[in-house]
Image (cartoon, grey):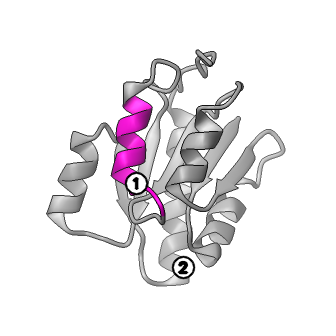
């Protein structure tokens, strides 16, 4: 299982990697901004099985990255979970309008964030059936 984390906060990235990288068969790839994410996802396969993405990213906003993924045949069905500190209804709605599969608000405290990440991991990696990554059209 290959997971791409698009997160510009190094502390959050470490916590998320720790939560998702605990199994030997899960590889977490971290990119720090929207431009790097699109370059990696538009590159040669294999594409990740799952993307976790912050909404507020440098260079290209998370929703704009999401729109680009949904417009591309190779990444159209890629599950994308938006993870943000924002609980504003307009941000949540905008992400779903752009094609997010889920939106999760990051809790402010370490224990809350760890518990939320375990829940995400348990559902998306242990319960949900994920599509196979599509071959690149590049």
Return the residue found at the far right: 24
Name the quarter where the N terminus is drawn: top right
Mark 1 burial class by Cα count in 10 Å: few <14, some 14-19, many 20+ = many
Residue 57: horizontal and vertical position, in percent? 46, 64
Q: Earlier in the sequence, mark 1 or mark 2?
A: 1
Residue 60: horizontal and vertical position, in percent? 43, 56
Residue denoted by label 2 = 111
Vertical relation: 89 (above or below) 124: below
Q: What are the residue bounds of the magenta stretch?
A: 59-70
Mark 2 burial class by Cα count in 10 Å: few <14, some 14-19, many 20+ = few
Residue shown at 44% from the left, 34% from the top? 69
- The answer to if 62 sits in the magenta stretch is yes
Residue denoted by label 1 = 62
Residue 22: horizontal and vertical position, in percent? 76, 55
Q: Is most of the magenta stretch helix, strand or loop?
A: helix
SS state under label 2: helix
- Left or right of 24: which side holds 67? left
Q: Name the residue nearer the viewer: 120 or 76.
A: 76
> Which of the 4 quarters of the picture holds residue 100?
top left
- The answer to if 76 sits in the magenta stretch is no
Residue shown at 50% from the left, 54% from the top? 34
Q: Which mark is residue 42?
A: none
Residue 56: horizontal and vertical position, in percent? 40, 66
Vertical relation: 97 (above or below) 18: above
Which label sits in the foreground, 1 or 2? 1
Residue shown at 54% from the left, 42% from the top? 38
Q: Is residue 122 visible?
A: no
Return the residue found at the far left: 90
CA distance for labels 1 and 2? 25 Å
Residue shown at 63% from the left, 67% from the top? 13
Q: Name the residue nearer the viewer: 99 or 22.
A: 99
Q: Is residue 99 visible?
A: yes
């Amino acid at each position: 299982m290959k997971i791409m984390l698009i997160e510009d906060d190094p502390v959050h990235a470490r916590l998320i990697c720790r939560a998702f990288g605990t199994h030997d068969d899960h590889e977490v790839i971290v990119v720090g901004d929207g431009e790097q994410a699109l370059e990696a996802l538009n590159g040669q396969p294999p594409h990740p099985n799952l993307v976790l993405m912050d909404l507020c990213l440098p260079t290209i906003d998370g929703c704009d990255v999401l729109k680009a993924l949904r417009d591309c045949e190779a990444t159209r069905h890629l599950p994308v979970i938006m993870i943000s500190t924002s609980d504003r209804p307009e941000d949540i709605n905008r992400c779903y309008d752009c094609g997010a599969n889920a939106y999760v608000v990051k809790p402010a405290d370490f224990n809350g964030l760890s518990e939320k990440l375990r829940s995400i991991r348990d559902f998306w990696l242990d319960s949900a059936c994920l599509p196979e990554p599509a071959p690149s059209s590049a």
